[in-house]
Amino acid sequence: TKRSVLTDGNGVPLALTIDGANRNDCKLLEGTLDAVDWTPGAGARLALCLDKGYDHAFCRTLATDHGLEPHIRARGEEAQAGREGTRARRSVVERTFAWFNRFRRLIVNWERLTCTRLALLQYAAALITWRRTHPVTRAEATY
């Protein structure tokens, strides 16, 4: 399966969709953006940072229709930026994917039903959100 995760700036998952592994990333974007209620405050501009897999007119239009400002690396631009020493902004999402991979059950897909797989991923997303919003100090931790 392929996971599509929308996170905030701290890596907290906001939306999650899955589909077959043979699907293009661009096709998962619509379901991911539809899973969130976009009501920013007055004058707030929300940005959507995507990699070159989303460099299509459809993705740019979809982001604009949801009230988001798309920041999409063009094809070939990411390799040029890597030589200049600037890092891609998607490192926040890559870190969130690494947090998902800490749950051993999610590394290999053993479920037959898509709804079971999605439920396990949503449960993991809830645990990640809880851990990011309620950090445990060393004094509170019990060993």
Image: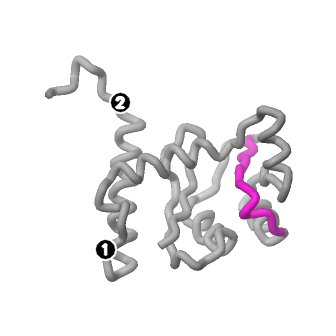
Residue at left offset 52%, top offset 59%: 15
- Residue 57 percent across, percent down from the top left: 84, 69
Q: Which residue is mark 1?
A: 110
Mark 2 sits on what residue? Answer: 135
Query: In this figure, what is the number of numbered marks?
Result: 2
User: Would you say residue 55 sits in the magenta stretch?
Assistant: yes
Q: Which residues are magenta?
A: 44-56
Q: Please tell me whether residue 130 is drawn above or below residue 103 in the rendered image.
A: above
Q: Earlier in the sequence, mark 2 or mark 1?
A: 1
Q: At x 85% / y 50%, what residue is drawn?
A: 77
Image vertical order of residue 133 relative to residue 8, above or below = above
Secondary-structure class at tag 1 = loop
Mark closer to the observer (2, 1): 1
Q: Amino acid at mark 1?
A: Trp
| CB-based contact (under 8 Å), mark 2 and mark 1 | no
Q: Residue 42: which quarter of the image?
A: top right
